[in-house]
Image (cartoon, rainbow, N blue to C red):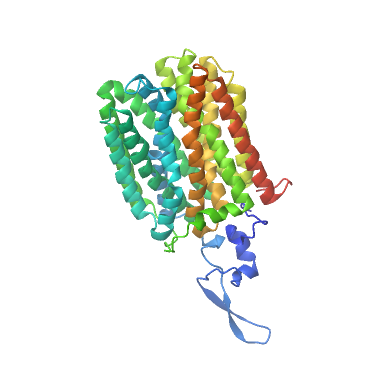
Amino acid sequence: MTESNPQSHNPLADPEKSEGDPAINNGHHGSTNASSQDFTSQDGEVVEKPAVNPMMDASAFPDGGAKAWLTVAGASSCLFVSFGWINCIGVFQEYYQTHQLAQYSPSDVAWIPALQIFFMLFGGPFVGKIFDDFGPRYLLCGGTFLHVFGLMMASISKKYYQFLLSQAICSAIGASMIFYPAFTCVSTWFFKKRGAALGLVAAGSSLGGVILPIMVIRLIPEVGFGWAMRICAFLILALLIFANLTVRSRIAPTKRPFDPMAFIRPLREPPFLLLTGAVFFFYWGMFIPFTFIVEEAYRHGMSDRMANYLVPILNGASIFGRTVPNALADKVGRFNMMIVMATFTSVLILALWLPATGNAALIVFAVLFGIGSGAGIGLTPVLCAGISPIKDIGVRTGTVFAIASIAALTGSPLGGRIITDSHGDFKYTIVFAGLSCAIGTALFLAARIVIGGVKMGKV
């Protein structure tokens, strides 16, 4: 059983339930039936029986096939170049602080990665609306241009505002137009294997988070910052050409009038509201280690080379975190798995990163945090899809990520301000990150209780 919500009166969120509910099958909830079949009533009259809407029918999901798996491959490429690039923020935070933007404080520099994450996530409702109306094609083409163009402009940037406009805004908006269609298209092809399929997609961001920062670290000394950025942009362009050719939605787009309430209305449902709040607080704390782990390692005496490799180490471990928990979630319950992994992440920050001082402890934290945070990122769209009608996944997932973008926007600069006010001490920033993740974990648990009750079971 998926994350259906018996208390939300939204049976369309659970295709399996819809299939077996005669009230739904007979159109009492306003669904439009795609086909029908005859049956004989008690008085012998042949009447037409509405069939299950294929958009809500679990049996209508292929859960495999060439088009479905090509979409997964293309979507994984999308995550490689979007969230995978965002996963490099720790490298850029440190590099800008010691080179082009050395005259700025850590809090000021942190606005570049923070705005990068914000614009990628905040575009969700708008991208979701365009996706629902027109499908993925225009989004992927436009996103390809903006993402690559932004990085090319960053390669020739010298001043603070130029990095903000190119890398933090233009490139990030393009990444947003690539990121959301990837998850949404895959959700239309898979139902029983949705968690595993989306885990493979999310693993693309982990792979990108390993390869791209290593490219940046190795290329800058060899060819300079400008050509390092351009080489990365050319690789991103090649992968996005492949994505444009393979990513497809199973559901034909349905153009509907723009309704701002479509983004707000889901928040009236208690499970969706709790999920949104959980993602907000969890992301508020989760992005702080991504941003500051390299700089904090320097403060504890780690060598420049080793500290820079903490980012690809963290992202390499997150490949496991974004695939295995997603596959297990299909069997043990997606909310259950998210609660376990969110708890694991919160404990790691407070019990391991906070007291860590030596190289070994920081490397172990990077590996384990990569696993925990990887699940947090990979399972979020799965949870959204599980409590949403399939035709509204784009808008509803976008709403969750748009609200979470405010956390991403404020978390790292706030952490940087705490570091500055503490005269370079990272302790209170780490405490802030851990407590934020713990609050998010509590809200995930509350959402799970609202949906499935307090009894042990697959939720």
Q: Position of residue 123 (x, y in %)?
A: 42, 47
Instruction: Count the numbered circles shown.
Output: 0
Q: Where is residue 91 in the image (x, y as percent from the top left)?
A: 40, 26
Q: Where is residue 145 in the image (x, y as percent from the top left)?
A: 29, 45
Is any atom of residue 443 visible in this view? yes
Is any atom of residue 192 visible in this view? no
For the point 54% across and 29% down, the residue is 369
For the point 38% across and 28% down, the residue is 213
> Is 12 on the left or on the right of 162, as rendered?
right
> Is 162 on the left or on the right of 297, as rendered?
left
Relative to 416, say whether 440 is above or below.
below
For the point 59% across and 18% down, the residue is 355
Relative to 345, say whether 300 is above or below.
above
- Residue farthest along the top direction in this orientation: 301
- Residue farthest along the right direction in this orientation: 455
Decide which of 15, 28 is in the foreground and name it. 28
Q: Where is residue 341 in the image (x, y as percent from the top left)?
A: 60, 36
For the point 49% across and 14% down, the residue is 300
